Amino acid sequence: MKTAKLFSLLVVTAVVLSCRTADERAAEALARRVMGDKARSVVFEQADWQEDTYELSQKGGKVLIRGNNANSMAVGLNRYLQQYCLTNVSWYDFNPVELPEVMPEVPEKVLVEARVPARFFLNYCTFGYTLPWWGWKQWERFIDWMALNGVNMPLAITGQEAVWQKVWRKYGMTDEQIRAYFTGPAHLPWHRMSNIDRWQGPLPQSWIDGQAKLQKRILQRERMLGMKPVLPAFSGHVPAELQDVVKDSINITPVRRWAGFDEKYHCSFLVPSDPLFARIQKDYLKEQTKMYGTDHLYGADLFNEVPPPSWEPEELAKMSAGVFESMTAVDPDALWVHMGWLFINARKNWTPERINAYLTAVPKGRMILLDYEGDYVEIWRRTERFHGQNFIWCYLGNFGGMTEIEGDYYHNARLIAGTMEEGGPGFIGLGATLEGFGVNEPVYEALLAQAWDTGIGTSEYIDNIADRHIGRVDSTFRTYWHMLADSVCVTHTSTASSSIICAHPNLSGVWNGTTYFIRGYDISHMDRALSVLETVEGKTDYFEFDLANARRQSIRNRALAVRDRFTAAYNAGDRDGMVAARDEFLQMCDDLTAVLKTRDEFSLDLWIKDARAWGKDPAEKDYMEMNARTIISIWGDSPVLNDYANRDFDGLVETFYKERWSMFFDAVIAAYDAGEPFINLNHRHRNLSGTPEDSPRAFILDQDIHDFEQAWIQPHGTTL
């Protein structure tokens, strides 16, 4: 009898489970991943609403989360976790999800509809500054984070080199030629955007194969959670050797020098009017669809920080029309997703007439423009709403993965409200185009939350950031967060956010345009906020990060004044003052390192460990480490991008930044002791504002720092 009852129970259970929709099962699996056994306190039900909508209510002893699809249900789950459980789920896999002992009920029904249908996330550059070394474990958490925050249109460019390898083989290129055409892993975003070829190549075959396998898992999970990934399309970037292996003459033009890279790293562009263009597009999209499937969204950006072959409006129209026609010839349902960054980066050249010609050559409704840095300049307002094409308002917020506390909550909210009101029918979504993750995750969560009609204002939302970071309502912690939002996070994010510690040594000003120290707020505001924060008692992982993050920011803010005291002492002939300022500055480097050591978010060791994990043997592991070290230090082939991806990392501050400053201080003091002048360094390597005879030690130091940097990027082999 007992056996019969057990069998009946199993049958009933199987029937119930089989009745669950795929979206419900996906939401349940997400809940189990982030909540563990406590996921049993929530149940999911798919509703037949036409628009993206979620609903929270109580169903007996469980919380019922309803939604029209898995993505909406995920957003509903996040609302429950954040508002009722006072819990936050990080985009990093190493941050724990800290739930209350007793799962709270939802006292009143909550019904929320999306304000926009599209929620975009990521930037080509993110795949170089944050994501290049991630494996499935890290991606799994991040995809869950995107779903919880409503992202349904992620950029998905991992693994495209495996597709291109198959395509270029068809045209007669050898694997050696193809792998040499690619850059090193962390620099692939700029290869994909037609900026550089071959830098730190050839790309190992193990990387190409491993990324293809990873991409399949990424896309499968994203689609399960209701996302439509944006896959790449052919935009005209071809290997220079293609001309040698194709029998017919083809219209290839060299791409202008980018970021100071030597000519041997320059890209080549095949104009869309060339008959071969459509053939390559067909080969690429068919091969990609075979490998990865398609959701009919394709990213293609022809002129990212490089000029087109012609600025004539008619020629620009032919080029954009040619790209679109080549896409739709393969996939009639294709939608072209296009960055709007080119209209910001080359604003003087992209005149209204040229923009109009380029955009209107594509049928209305078949192109989606990413208004790439809406918090800085809203391109839709300057282009008659992109001349009728659909667009997504995007917040950029981070350049290079830099670790500056910034991002204006209130300013973003005002701009989004204005776009909601005035953007017109072409405004279809919100997004974030962050170059790297940095240290401002709540800013992006706040942005994506505004895609939903929650009725929660900015001030109330900031209260909840504090509550879910500490796991309780704490008025003092709320005060800290409001001080941060009201008096620190009040300026537009800079393309060169840095501290003087992370910058190339210099007596005054800046050595390079990649590092600036203008905060846009009185740094005493950060110190006052920190003094409030340090009175709060908290034990959650998020609270401990907030504390370390604030202490780190306070140190980096105060370092500039110490550098300036050193310079003032040098100018005044005060040797004791110089020594005192030097010692204080180097001690601040040590103090900063001590803070960084407390958090994995600031770990060079993890960055290198993840990179080395992609190598199949010691030589490949060393190659990956070299590439990982390069991008966060010297970046590339010339000083133009030196320190662009500067960041507060334990292991980077003490072995790289502090060492450069020690060399600098010693050289200046030695010059003073020898009665020699010391000229101020500038960013042009070996092109100082003087001669070696004027200041021999400055020229020697310039070369010594260059040699030190070149040695630092070499693999140390200390991490497996």
Image (cartoon, rainbow, N blue to C red):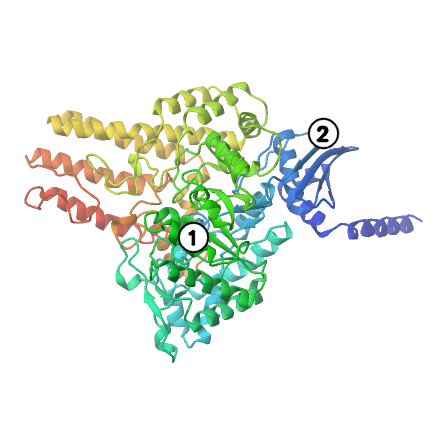
- Residue 181 in percent (x, y) is at 37, 66
* Between discs 2 and 1, the one toward the N terminus: 2
For disc 1, the marked residue is: 356
Q: Are marks 2 and 1 in contact (CB under 8 Å)?
A: no
Instruction: Inspect this view and state whether residue 429 appears.
Output: yes
Instruction: Inspect this view and state whether residue 445 appears.
Output: no
Q: Which mark is residue 269?
A: none
- Left or right of 297, for residue 68: right
- Residue 354 in percent (x, y) is at 38, 54
Q: Which of the two residues, 11 or 414, is positioned nearer the viewer here? A: 414
Q: Residues within 10 Å of mark 1 (few under 14, many from 20)?
A: some
- The quarter of the picture where residue 526 lies is top left
Residue at point 55% right, 44% down?
A: 429
Q: Which of the two residues, 633 or 196, is positioned nearer the viewer here? A: 196
Local secondary structure at mark 1 = helix
- Residue 360 in percent (x, y) is at 47, 55
Amino acid beneath label 2: Glu
For disc 2, the marked residue is: 105
Local secondary structure at mark 2 = loop
Q: Residues within 10 Å of mark 2 (few under 14, many from 20)?
A: many
Q: Which mark is nearer the camera, 2 or 1?
A: 1
Amino acid beneath label 1: Asn
Q: Is residue 710 above or below residue 404?
A: below
